[in-house]
Image: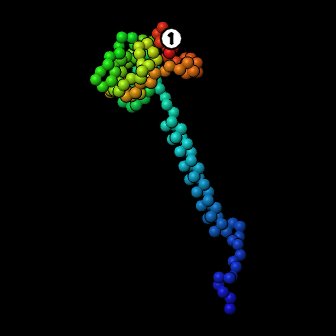
Amino acid sequence: MTDASTIERPPPLQGSPTTRRTRRRLWFVAAVLVGALVFLLVEGLGSSLDYFDTVDQALAHRATLGTSTFRLEGVVVPGTIRRTAVGTNFTVSEGVEQVAVHNVGSPPELFQQNIPVVVVGHFSRVGSELFLSNQIMVKHSANYIAAHPGRVKAPNGSVR
C-alpha cells in the first residue's frame, strides 16, 4: 500500500486550463500594478508642478479660474501699498492691466513697490478684480532672472 502523500503527480501540460488560468492571473496582477504606478506618477508629477499666471493671463481667464487657488505674477504698483491690521493691500500690474491684492499675513522683508512678486491666492468671486492672498513671494535672484528673461520686470526695466 502506498502513501497518498508520496505519489508524485506529473507537471501540468503546457496549455492546460490550470497553466492558462495562472498566466491570466499574473498578467492581470501585472496590469494592475503598471496602472497603479502610472496613476501615481501622473498624480504626483501633476500636483508637484507650480503654475502661475501673469496679471494679463489671470484677468483673461477669470471665468475659468473662478475662486480656485493659483499663483499670480505681477509688479507692485508704486504708491499702492497699504498696511492693514491683518496684512497688506496693494496692486500688481503687468503693463496696462492691474489687480488689487488683499494679503493676509506679513509680507517678506524684501517686499516693496516696483518689484516683481508672485502672490498665492484666488479671486474673491468669479469675475472679480480683487485677489485674496495668503502668501507673497519676492523674486530677487539674479539666477532666476537670467533663467527666465521674458518674465515680468519693473516698469523702469530693473530687476531685483
Using a 10 Å C-alpha cutoff, classify the residue at mark 1 as few (fewer than 14 neighbours), some (14 to 19) or many (20 or more).
few
Estimate the x, y position of residue 135 in percent, counting from the top left.
40, 27
Residue at image point 66% right, 66% down: 19
Residue at the image point whose x is 28% and y is 23% from the top: 85
Is residue 110 shown left or right of residue 6? left
Q: Which quarter of the figure has residue 103? A: top left
| Image quadrant assignment for residue 73 | top left
Q: Is residue 153 visible to us here? A: yes
Which residue in the structure is indicated by mark 1? 158
25 to 79, vertically: above or below: below
Spot the residue most to the front: 109
Q: In this view, does 154 lie to the left or right of 131?
A: right
- Position of residue 131 measured from the top left corner of the image (x, y, whole percent): 36, 24
In this view of the protein, which residue sits in the foreground, 89 or 84? 84
Position of residue 31 in the picture relative to residue 90 (left or right):
right
The location of residue 22, given as percent across then percent down, is 62, 64
Q: Where is residue 42 in the image (x, y as percent from the top left)?
A: 54, 41
Quadrant housing the N terminus: bottom right
Among all residues in the image, which is located at the extreme left?
A: 85
Colour mode of the rendering:
rainbow
Residue 128 in sight from this viewpoint = no
**In the orientation shown, which residue stands out farthest toward the bottom?**
1
Residue occupying image coordinates x 62% and y 57%: 27
Q: Nearer the viewer, residue 38 or 89?
A: 89
What kind of residue is marked 1? Ser
Which SS class for mark 1?
A: loop
What is the quadrant of residue 87 in the picture? top left
